[in-house]
Image (cartoon, grey):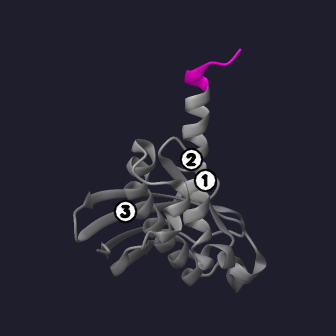
Amino acid sequence: MNNPLIESTALRDQRRNDALAILTHSVPYLHFMGIHAERRGSELTFVMRFRPTLLGNPDPPHLHGGATAGFLEVAASIQIAWDQLWPQIDSGSRDANTAHEMALPKTIDFTVDYLRAGNPSDAFARARVNRSGRRYTSVHVEAWQENHDKLFAQATGHFLMSE
């Protein structure tokens, strides 16, 4: 039995997943750092898989501050692009295959608060766009490891939108 509603929902989800895959594959830094995005509805969770090369201090082992900052900044940047892309994909005004053509926003400033040392394990992050205008966007990012209630870093960034 073919149900058009189920088929259209499956096609819409496939378009969303394809667009996210194309968007994230267009950023080589994600692959270099071992970062990927997981989608639940419109919400993205970024995952940075632990690798020993991410350590800054080997004894005791802690994540490098630069790796943490890069993780947070790329999560913010991809979230901004995703927030622009999501309604276009849903409305059909943009094809998922054109996601790689999206220009990522340029960082104006980015401030990281290191709340505790990052352990040698996978890290997770979610970004929230606080304000998005035609030229400027403000984002807040939170990162955790084992427990979302115990953040190890957070950041606030301001980005210049591409025209």
Distance from disc 3 to disc 2, alpha carbons, whole Å, reads 27 Å
Residue 76 at x, y percent in the picture: 44, 66
Q: From the image, which quarter does the C terminus lie in?
A: bottom left
Q: Is 88 rendered above or below residue 53?
A: above
Q: Are marks 3 and 2 in contact (CB under 8 Å)?
A: no
Residue beneath the point at 36% across and 79% down: 106
User: What type is the residue that disc 1 sits on?
Assistant: Asp
Which mark, by number, is residue 18?
1
Q: From the image, which quarter does the N terminus lie in?
A: top right
Which residue is denoted by mark 3 in the rendering? 140
Which residue is denoted by mark 2 in the rendering? 15
Residue beneath the point at 68% across and 79% down: 32
Occupied quadrant, residue 120: bottom right
User: What type is the residue that disc 2 sits on?
Assistant: Arg
Which element carries disc 2, helix, strand or loop?
A: helix
Q: Is residue 62 magenta?
A: no
Closer to the observer: label 3 or label 2? 2
Residue beneath the point at 29% across and 66% down: 138
Question: What range is drawn magenta here?
Answer: 1-6
Give whichever of discs 1 and 3 has the lower sequence position: 1
Residue 105 at x, y percent in the picture: 37, 74
Residue beneath the point at 76% across and 74% down: 51
Residue 59 at x, y percent in the picture: 74, 83
Q: Outermost residue toward the top?
A: 1
